[in-house]
Image (cartoon, rainbow, N blue to C red):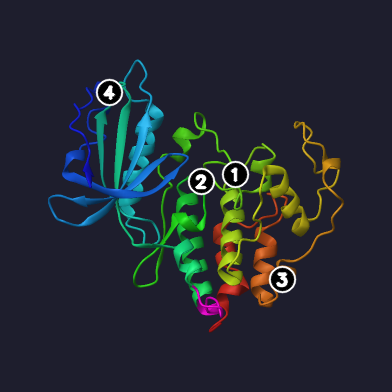
Amino acid sequence: MSQSPQLKRQKMSSHSKNFGDGDPHNYQELNIIGTGAYGTVYRARDMITGNIVALKKVRIALNDNGVPMSTLREIALLKQLNASDHANIVKLYEVCQFLERDDQLMIVLVFEHLEQDLSDLIERLPKSGMSPSTVQNLSRELLTGLDFLHSHRIIHRDLKPQNLLVSSQGHLKIADFGLAKTYDSEMKLTSVVVTLWYRAPEVLLAQPYNSSVDVWSAACIIFEMYNRKALFPGTSEKNQLDRIFELTGRPSAQQWPKSISVSREHFPQRHPKRPRDFCPNLCECSDDLLKQMLDYDIRLRPSALACLDHEYFQQEPL
C-alpha cells in the first residue's frame, strides 16, 4: 500500500482557485484498477470515512493563465452532471488538485467504487450465457446513461465493457467519461492504450464524428452480452475495418472518404450481413436494433434516445 507523496498545492490563477477544493491526501491508494488514454485509475481508501473509492488521476499542462479554460469547463460540467445524480452515471464525490515535481498539475477525480465491471461479468458467465432479460435491462441502462451524457453534449469516445460498472444490485453505471474532450487533442487514441474493438469506422478512418460513435460502441457491447465474445476483435486498424466490413459490407466508392491515404481497394468486396449471422441466438428485435446501431452511415444510426424507443425494449418479458 502506498500513499500519495506530500506535494505542494498548485498556486492557481484567480479564475481557477476553487475548481478542485478536495484534499488528495485524504485518500490512501491501494492498487491500480486500470490505465487508459486519459489517466490512471486507482482503488483507494477514504482515510476519513474508511470507504473504498476510485481515484482517477489526470495530468494537465498549465498555460500562462494557470489551468486551461477548457479543463475548467470540463470540471464544471462534471460537477453539474453530478448534481443530477443520474442512476446510470458513476457518482463523483470530489475533485482534488496538486502540483507535481515537474510543474505539471495533477487533477484527482474521486468517484464511487464498484467492485465489478461488465467485462468481469461477461467473463464469469456460465456456458448458457446472460439471460435475455438481463441483457435487455443492462442495455436499457447503458442507453439511458448515454442519452443523459449526449443531452449534455458529452461524447464518451471510449465505451467498452471495462468502462461500464455493475453494482451489486445488478445496475449498470457508465464510468471514465470525465475530461475526455480536454485530452483528445493532446493524447491521440492508439491501439496500445485504447482497444480498437468498439471503435466506430469513421474514427478508424479519421473522419469527422459525433455522438453516434457511442451508439456504435454500445451496439458492440450489447452484442457481446449476448454472444460472450467481441463482435469485432481486430488485431490492427486495417483488420478492425475489414472485420467491420464483414457485417456492413465494403463501403461504396461514393461512401469511401476522399481525404485518407488508405485505399478502398485494400479491402475485399463484401456484401452486408446481419448481426444475427454472427450470433444466431439474437431475437428478431435485438437483431434489428443492432443492425440500425451498426450502420456504416452515421446519419442513419439512431440516437441513444431513439434506440430506447425501439420495439426491442417494448417486449415484456423477454
N-terminal of the pair, mark 2 or mark 4, is: 4
Please state, as top left, top right, bottom left or bottom right, where the C terminus lies in the image.
bottom right
Contact, mark 2 vs mark 1 (Cβ under 8 Å):
yes
N-terminal of the pair, mark 2 or mark 3, is: 2
Q: Residue at x 56, y 78 (%)?
A: 127
Examine the rendered structure and indicate whether residue 185 appears above or below residue 145: above
Q: Amino acid at mark 1?
A: Asn
Q: CA distance from mark 2 to mark 1?
A: 7 Å
Give the extent of the magenta segment. Answer: 125-133
Instruction: Tell me if mark 1 has few (under 14), some (14-19) or many (20+) residues whose alpha carbon lies within 10 angstroms of its own.
Output: some
Name the secondary structure under disc 3: helix
Tell me the tag on residue 276.
3
* Residue beneath disc 2: 155
Name the secondary structure under disc 2: loop
Of circles 4 and 1, the one toward us is 4
- List the single residue furthest toward the bottom: 317
Q: CA distance from mark 2 to mark 3?
A: 28 Å
Residue 23 in view, yes or no:
no
Where is residue 74 drawn, in percent x and y? 39, 37
Of circles 3 and 4, the one toward us is 4
Name the secondary structure under disc 1: loop
* Residue beneath disc 1: 210
Q: CA distance from mark 3 to mark 1?
A: 27 Å
Dominant secondary structure (helix, strand or loop) of the stretch shown in magenta: loop
Q: Amino acid at mark 2?
A: Ile
Contact, mark 2 vs mark 3 (Cβ under 8 Å):
no
* Residue beneath disc 4: 101
Q: CA distance from mark 3 to mark 4?
A: 54 Å
